[in-house]
Image (cartoon, rainbow, N blue to C red):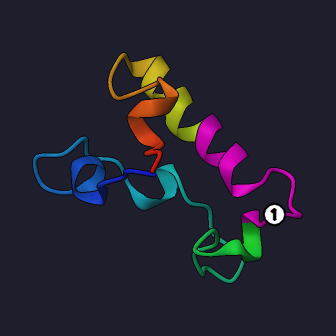
Amino acid sequence: ILFDHQTHFGDGGYGLACDDCHHYEQDGTMSCSGEDCHGPESDPTRGDAMHMNCKGCHEDNGAGPVECSACHIMK
């Protein structure tokens, strides 16, 4: 998957905050940094979460890729 945090969060980027995409545990630690939150056995899986958040945001805002091949690079 192609993803550039600077484009989304950095100066001159879209100005998103971390918690626009990631969520936090009750103790304030960031979740979703690994498969502990959206792993292969989770519902939703990491792929499901990214498709809902990333693709949904791109569609809602008319910006960013929404086609499979724009993010998924096949070797």
Is residue 13 inside the magenta stretch?
no
The residue shown at (62%, 61%) is 23
Q: Nearer the viewer, residue 68 or 3?
A: 68
Helix, strand, or loop for circle 1? Answer: loop
Placement of 38 over or under 67, stated as above or below: below
Pointer 1: what residue? 40
Q: Is residue 73 left or right of residue 46?
A: left
**Residue at image x 25%, y 41%?**
14
How far from the left and from the top, in percent, is residue 70? 39, 33
On the image, which quarter does residue 6 sit in?
Answer: bottom left
Q: Residue 72's x, y, as percent?
A: 48, 43
Q: Which residue sits furthest front?
A: 75
Magenta span = 38-52
Asked whether 41 falls inside the magenta stretch, the response is yes
Which residue sits at x=48%, y=19%?
59
Disc 1 marks a residue whose amino acid type is Pro
| Residue 37 vertical position relative to residue 42 in the rendered view, above or below | below
